[in-house]
Amino acid sequence: MMQPDLIPALDPNPLPAPYWVFKLLLVVTFFLHIVAMNFMLGGAVLALVSKWRSGDRENGNRVFFDVARKLPSLLPATITLGIAPLLFVQVLYGQFFYTSSIIIAWPWFLVLVFLTLAYYGFYLASFQSGQHAGKAGGVMLSSVILIFLIGFVYSNNLTLSQSPSRWGGKYFADPAGWNLNLSEPTLIPRFLHFMVAAVAVGGLFLIFVALANWKRDREYARRVLQFGGKAFMYATIAQLVVGVVFLVSLPRDMRMLYMGDNSLATILLLVGVAGGIGAIFLMSDALRKENVRVAAFYVPGIIGVVILSMSVMRDILRDAYLKPYFHPEQFVVKTQWSVFPLFLVLFLAGVILWLVMLKRYGLFSGTKAADTLPSAGSQAAKRS
Ligand code: HEM
């Protein structure tokens, strides 16, 4: 049922740049946000698996603390890179996004609380040392659960934002804002699609850790390579199933977009699936030959293209859902040419500066066992 009267009027302020520029920036910055989120969440999940899986306890702990120390920088990177698409989504889809945010007001507000607590947790886990090292796992797990909840609230909000026909029912069911979008059939497959991807990309993050340690500590780096590479492969295999479930959960006309009705969407889906399968084989070969370069450059290169394709597919899906309500040709465009180039230069400079900062901070630098493993560190200190 269409309820156009519930959709706020289009903001009469003109767009300061052409529509396609905002669209491009939305997709590109969303891609950056999701990659940072995947490194952070996938890295944290795999750090926990490494700590708690049976087998080599010392190396498991070392991987855990190696990753734990990087999380307090990866979380703000996720947030900073989330603010950019937040601005663009408000400019283009404000009528829908603001409304759904109000309908799920309390869970949406709780994101801030969860984020703050998760941030504290990551700091706490990374500072644990010596006899407190054992508690770090529990603290990290609490942060990971909070981060999962944040992702879940985002998926609720974004699915609701593209289903205006549900707004009235939800709002009047609880005008105070204690709502989610749990009746949406695509919600769980969509959310799982993001979370499984996070674990796969977290595996790639560990490959970067292996690369950074390759010259310094070959034995450790080899173990990290195998662990990260296998995590990537298993999660990507699982993704082939989750992805199909997601596709099947879509309404028929949306699903058909990817099966021939929209050529761009169909090509992007093929690129995504072929890229995913190709990356699994390449990673398997790299692990067998212990070729860290293939694992750290070629596989992430392919997966970068896959994530970009999926980001565009996601955008096509949103526009398909909003087709009856969203008419971009109604935007008034008054390009501010005087500031637009300045914006682009500053945007690029900002991304470059951000990468330099991460490098300087040592996000991708190698570590010694004594740096990362608190108990080994204190034992080494005692010995000396
Ligand atoms: C740190 C925990 C976070 C996680 C796990 C997370 C995860 C996600 C996920 C899974 C989505 C896609 C949801 C979907 O389409 O179903 C998403 C979208 C988005 N996130 Fe985040 N996010 C986090 C933090 C943030 C923050 C702090 C911001 C803003 C400051 C942000 C801004 C956005 C925006 C604007 C989108 C939607 C972009 C679009 O619709 O094109 N995120 N996030």
Image (cartoon, rainbow, N blue to C red):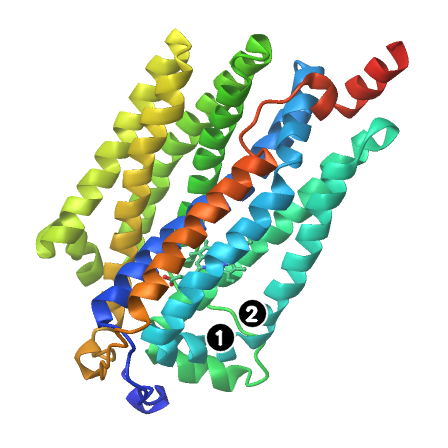
| Residue 195 visible in the current orientation | no
Q: Secondary structure at mark 1?
A: helix
Whole-angstrom CA distance, mark 2 to mark 1, is 6 Å
Quarter holding residue 99:
bottom left
Left or right relative to 131: residue 371: left
The amino acid at mark 2 is Trp
In this view, which residue lies farthest toward the right?
382
Quarter holding residue 135:
top right
The reply to whether the residue tagged 1 has its Cβ within 8 angstroms of ligand 1 is no
Q: Foreground: 130 or 384?
A: 384
Q: Residue, x 32% and y 60% (percent of image)?
A: 25
Q: Foreground: 168 or 286?
A: 286
Q: How far across and how far down the image is residue 341, in percent?
A: 29, 64
Q: How many marks?
A: 2
Q: How far across and how far down the image is residue 202, in percent?
A: 49, 35
Q: How far across and how far down the image is residue 11, in percent?
A: 33, 87
Q: Are marks 2 and 1 in contact (CB under 8 Å)?
A: yes
Left or right relative to 262: residue 1: right
Q: Residue, x 59% and y 13% (percent of image)?
A: 220
Q: Residue, x 72% and y 51% (percent of image)?
A: 120
Q: Is residue 361 above or below residue 280?
A: below
Residue topped by disc 2: 108
Q: Secondary structure at mark 2?
A: helix
Question: In the rendering, which numbered label is found on residue 32?
Answer: none
Q: Foreground: 286 or 180?
A: 286
Q: Is residue 153 above or below residue 44?
A: below
Q: How far across and how far down the image is residue 362, in percent?
A: 59, 33
Mark 2: few/some/many CA within 10 Å (<14, 14-19, 20+) = many
Residue topped by disc 1: 101
